[in-house]
Structure formats: C-alpha cells, structure tokens
Amino acid sequence: MKYIIYGLAAGFFVFGVLLLVEGFFSTGAIRDLYGEFKITACGRCLTAFLMFLAYLFFLVWLGVTAFTSLPVFMYYNVWSMCQNTSSVEGANLCLDLRQFGAVTISEDRKVCTRSEKFFRMCESNELDLTFHLFVCALAGAGAAVIAMVHFLMALAANWGYLKDASRMQKYEDIKSKEEQELHDIHSTRSKERLNAYT
C-alpha cells in the first residue's frame, strides 16, 4: 500500500509537470487569438497525450473511490451493531468477517455481541477514529473523481477549440491569398485598360 501511494504521488507530480509544459505550448495560441494564430504540433500532440493520461488517472481515482467505500461500509456496519447492542439486549448479533473479504472463506472469524472482544472494540476510540478517517478518504477520493471529470471536460473542450481555431486559421490564410490574387489580377487589368486608353 505504501508503494502504491508513492507511485500515485510520483505519477501526479509528472502529470503536473506535463500540464505546465502543455500550458507553455498551447496558451500562446489563445493569447494571440485575434492576431496571428500559431500552434505547434508538439502542443497539439501533448494535449492529446494529456487527455489520455487524464482519463487513465480518472480510472485510477475511480478505483480508489470504490476501494475506500468498502471499509466505510464495513465500519458503518460495526458501528451500527455497537449502537444497537444496548437496544437489543437478548439477541446475539454476530459479524462475520468473511462477508467483507477481510479473511479467507475457510477461516471462521466471527465477532459476536456477547463476547468481551466485541465490547472492547465498541468502547475503543480507534473504531470511531478509523471510521472517520475512512469517511474522509472516501470524500477526498470522490472529490478527486469529480475534479478529474471536470478537468477532462475542460481539456476536451480546449482540444476542440484549438482544432477548430487551427482550421479557421488555414481558411483565413487561403481566403487572404485568394483576395490578394484577385486584387493583383484586378490591378493588372486596370493598368492594362488604362494603358489601352492612353
């Protein structure tokens, strides 16, 4: 688990550096929107690569969200059993750890409400602290998923804008060349007509 966290941190650091480089390659085009539009091929390729990379990171964070929801569910069940032991005094409620995948199916690890181990677990501060930390982790992973979806939408819109702006600039270049040629042809004919009258 420690190496997974180190890998995620290093991956997001590299992702941040790539975003910085992509910003240098593509913001010049936006800044000069009404002037001469130029975008490098490196900027467009880097934007496409970052869209792919952002999608992969989105899938990673979606997995992290799914895996952090399991302990929250498990700790919520334990917490509710701890809260309900006083209201249902005659019942013997048991928590089977095989249901949550915490132990293998062949092992029989049950924690029942009438055992001393269960009472110590319910009275400990670690249960509440762990539950709240897992809820915070789930909320943070959910926020990261929402942020990645928002970032993907913005990056895809920027990609479409740059692609359309590049096509528009090619169209404007062709149009200005044709207008220049028409102007040259018209001025040449005007000179010929003027020479013909004189």
Image (tube, rainbow, N blue to C red):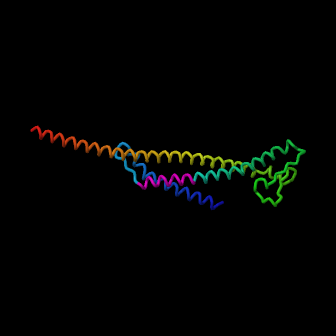
Q: Which residues are magenta?
A: 41-56
Q: Residue at 87% of width from left, 53% of height from top?
A: 115
Q: Position of residue 16 (x, y in %)?
A: 51, 54
Q: Is residue 44 highlighted in magenta?
A: yes
Can see residue 65? yes
Residue found farthest to the right: 90
Q: Residue at 90% of width from left, 45% of height from top?
A: 90
Residue found farthest to the left: 198
Q: Is residue 119 highlighted in magenta?
A: no
Which corner quadrant holds the C terminus?
top left
Q: Residue at 63% of width from left, 62% of height from top?
A: 3
Decide whether the magenta segment is chiefly helix, strand or loop.
Answer: helix
Q: Nearer the viewer, residue 178 or 42?
A: 178
Q: Residue at 85% of width from left, 43% of height from top?
A: 86
Q: Position of residue 155 (x, y in %)?
A: 50, 48
Q: Position of residue 44 (x, y in %)?
A: 44, 52
Residue found farthest to the front: 196
For the image, the number of numbered tags is 0
Q: Nearer the viewer, residue 100 or 114?
A: 100
Is 10 situated left or right of 176 in this image?
Answer: right
Can see residue 129? no
Q: Position of residue 162 (x, y in %)?
A: 43, 47
Residue 179, image quadrant: top left
Q: Nearer the viewer, residue 175 or 196?
A: 196
Which corner quadrant holds the N terminus?
bottom right
